[in-house]
């Protein structure tokens, strides 16, 4: 967000102005609160009120300024949204490559998304990412969506949560699937769990652009 560039002009202006505090016409000093060339608020204080000390309070008001700020804000928001979508697609493509599937077309368009990544007859994956270092809020609605899409075609659902800044990804899968994985690993002593898993690179480490949040 663009920050306002505020300045306060203080200028002695002599006689002929009414003091904003006591209301009397006396030699006074004017105070102009400005955002660059635009006057947001003005105040006038006589010498006597100034000598006594006075807390000048400004209530900045400017429609033009408000509009400009909100336009800037919207532009920034649009840019951020676009960057997140681009980033999201890139990560989905990375996941698709790693699982040997493909990215679902139009998956960035959430209203029609039926899982972000699909490995035919195996997986329906939803990919989420966060730049937070402290956590990710898992929504039942997101889980329900990926489960229902997977159920339609008899595939396994998985919700990938990528902690981009931590460079760690996790997958939320149904408990019954987890038990199945446990069973498979137990049954096959040739699978060295940790070293096999360590060879997989997290999707978050792939060419992340900087400053996207
Ligand atoms: Zn005064």
Image: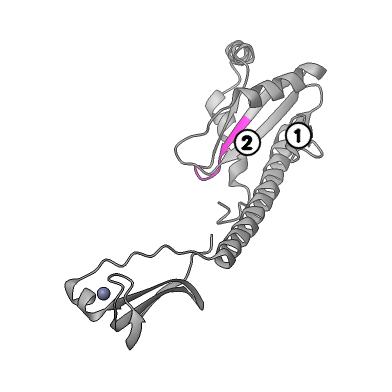
- Residue 11 visible in rendering: no
Write the residue at 30% across / 82% down: 28
- Residue 17 visible in rendering: yes
**Mark 2 vs 1, N-terminal side:** 1
Return the residue at label 2.
128
Was residue 161 drawn as part of the magenta stretch in this picture?
A: yes
Extreme residue in the front direction: 24
Using residue 24 as the reference point, say whether residue 160 is left or right of it: right
Quadrant hosting ligand 1: bottom left
Residue 139 in percent (x, y) is at 59, 26
Return the residue at label 1.
111
Number of labels in the image equals: 2
Was residue 86 drawn as part of the magenta stretch in this picture?
A: no
In the foreground, 44 or 23: 23
Q: Secondary structure at mark 1?
A: helix
Whether residues under marks 2 and 1 lie with C-beta atoms below 8 angstroms apart, the answer is no
Residue 157 in percent (x, y) is at 70, 22
> Viewer-nearest of labels 2 and 1?
1
Which residues are drawn in magenta? 160-166
Residue 119 in percent (x, y) is at 78, 28
How many neighbours does mark 2 have within 10 angstroms: few (below 14), some (14-19), or many (20 or more)? many
In the foreground, 3 or 50: 50
Badge 2 residue CB within 8 Å of ligand 1 = no
Write the residue at 45% across / 64% down: 60
Extreme residue in the left direction: 52
| Whether residue 105 is situated above or below residue 70 in the rendered picture | above
Residue 185 in percent (x, y) is at 59, 16
How many neighbours does mark 1 have within 10 angstroms: few (below 14), some (14-19), or many (20 or more)? few
| Whether residue 184 is situated above or below residue 164 in the rendered picture | above
Cα distance in 3D space between marks 2 and 1 = 15 Å
Q: Secondary structure at mark 2?
A: strand
Write the residue at 70% across / 50% down: 86
């Amino acid at each position: 967000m663009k920050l306002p560039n505020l300045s306060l002009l203080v200028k002695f202006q002599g006689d002929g102005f009414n003091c904003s505090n006591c209301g009397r016409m006396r030699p006074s000093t004017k105070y102009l609160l400005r955002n660059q060339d635009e006057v947001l608020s003005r105040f006038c204080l006589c010498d006597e009120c100034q000598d006594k000390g006075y807390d000048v309070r400004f209530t900045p008001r400017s429609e033009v300024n408000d509009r400009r700020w909100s336009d800037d804000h919207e532009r920034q928001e649009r840019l951020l949204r676009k960057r997140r979508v681009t980033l999201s697609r890139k990560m989905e493509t990375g996941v698709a490559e790693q699982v040997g599937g493909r990215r679902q077309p139009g998956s960035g368009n959430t209203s029609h998304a039926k899982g972000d990544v699909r490995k035919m007859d195996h997986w329906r994956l939803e990919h989420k990412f966060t730049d937070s270092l402290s956590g990710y809020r898992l929504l039942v609605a997101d889980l329900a969506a990926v489960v229902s899409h997977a159920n339609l075609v008899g595939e396994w659902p998985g919700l990938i949560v990528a902690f981009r800044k931590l460079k760690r990804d996790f997958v939320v899968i149904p408990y019954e699937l987890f038990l199945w994985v446990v069973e498979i690993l137990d049954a096959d002593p040739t699978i060295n769990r940790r070293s096999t898993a360590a060879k997989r690179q997290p999707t978050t480490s792939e060419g992340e652009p900087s400053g996207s949040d």
